[in-house]
Image: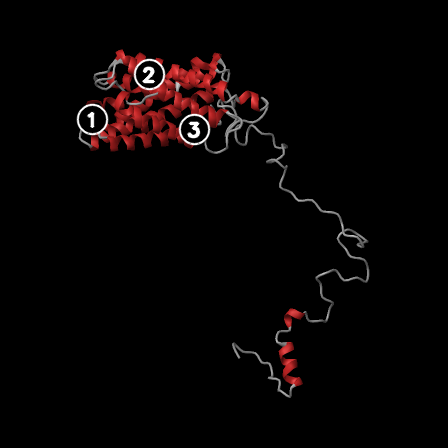
Amino acid sequence: MVGELPRRLVAEAIGTMLLVLFGAGSIVAALVVGRGTLNYAGLGIISLSFAVAVAVSVFAFGTTSGAHINPAVTVALAAGRRFPWSEVPSYIVAQLIGGFVGALLIVGGFGGRAVRLGGVGLTQLQPGVNPWQGLLFEALGTFLLLLTIMALAVDRRAPTGWAGLMIGLAVAGEIFVLGPLTNGSVNPARTFGPYLANALFGGSTPWAQLGVYIAGPVIGAVVAVVVYDFVARPERELPAGTAQGLAGEITGAREPGREVAAGVEQGAMGPILGERGPRPEGLEGPEGTAPEGTVPEGTVPEGTVPEARRPHEEELRGHAAHGGWRRPWRHGPGR
């Protein structure tokens, strides 16, 4: 984990704010453009917006706070002994604050239309979906999300550089399926922020459904961590000291520049400084000089003209041997 707790909490709040602003905000934007209607193509644009917001947050803050930006992720990682329980409440509070600020920014940008048309991008169960179905779908969507996080950001065998992109795409994938059913939250902070902002500005808020969007993601996230540890066995395959994924533990890695001492070797092979190799046999005298009377390879004795500077000499010599004539050389731009 990198840095002091307050700085990591700020990173969590900013990451969750970006998620809500550009994720839930895209719902309001789509409804404004569609004049209150939203089709499946519009849902695809919303999914892409969520994916970008998540990916940027992971790449930006993954090495600082782990970029959980989701209370369900924080609880699941703590349950899997990859995050301290003592810091779970602080992380969740920071995420809830970030989600609320993001929702306020949506209202600030779209004004009354954000509340009137889209409920500030809030999530709710769609007609025909009961709470138990909603809980199941939210759990399954979060299962996909945590499986991706475990495989690409936690497992030490993970290929580097893919975590942010694939986690974002996992969020987009679950919205493709869950969007028409539960609006695809998989994140209690993403639901709580728009709920609170919508209620403050006079919108109708389905507070009775909040439990679905808390229990479903937490259950799905914890189950995903347990299943991944049991099936993939990341701790048994590599020793605990091996570096993990893109940024070490999901709780963060070293801070660029400040966390590494100046004298620590660079990269895997130390500083990118060359060393003088062994001297060839036969060379004597001070280092870098050749023995007296010898000419180093590649040099030309003084007063001679290198072969490369005598073009056409063989051709001219052949003309003379066959009675030809030598054309006098002169300065000029051409022949």
Residue 276 image position (x, y, % from top left): 71, 46
Q: Is residue 100 left or right of residue 276?
A: left
The residue closer to the viewer here, 227 or 120, is 227
At x 69% / y 44%, what residue is drawn? 275
Q: Which residue is mark 1?
A: 113
| Residue type highlighted by circle 2 | Leu
Disc 2, SS: helix
Give the mark, 3 or 2, whose residue is nearer the N terminus: 3
Q: Is residue 255 left or right of residue 277?
A: left
| Residue type highlighted by circle 3 | Val
Residue 5 image position (x, y, % from top left): 48, 19
C-alpha separation, residue under disc 1 versus residue under disc 3: 30 Å
| Above or below for 243 versus 313 | above
Residue 324 image position (x, y, % from top left): 62, 87
Q: Which residue is mark 3?
A: 58
Residues tagged 1 and 3 counted as in contact (Cβ below 8 A): no
Q: Which residue is mark 2?
A: 136
Which-is-in-front pick, marks 3 and 2? 2
| Above or below for 111 versus 279 | above
Other residues around mark 1 within 10 Å, as few (<14) / some (14–19) / many (≥20): some
C-alpha separation, residue under disc 3 versus residue under disc 2: 26 Å
Residues tagged 1 and 2 counted as in contact (Cβ below 8 A): no
Residue farthest bottom in this picture: 323
C-alpha separation, residue under disc 1 versus residue under disc 2: 32 Å
The residue closer to the viewer here, 17 or 128, is 128
Instruction: Report whether residue 67 is seen.
Output: no
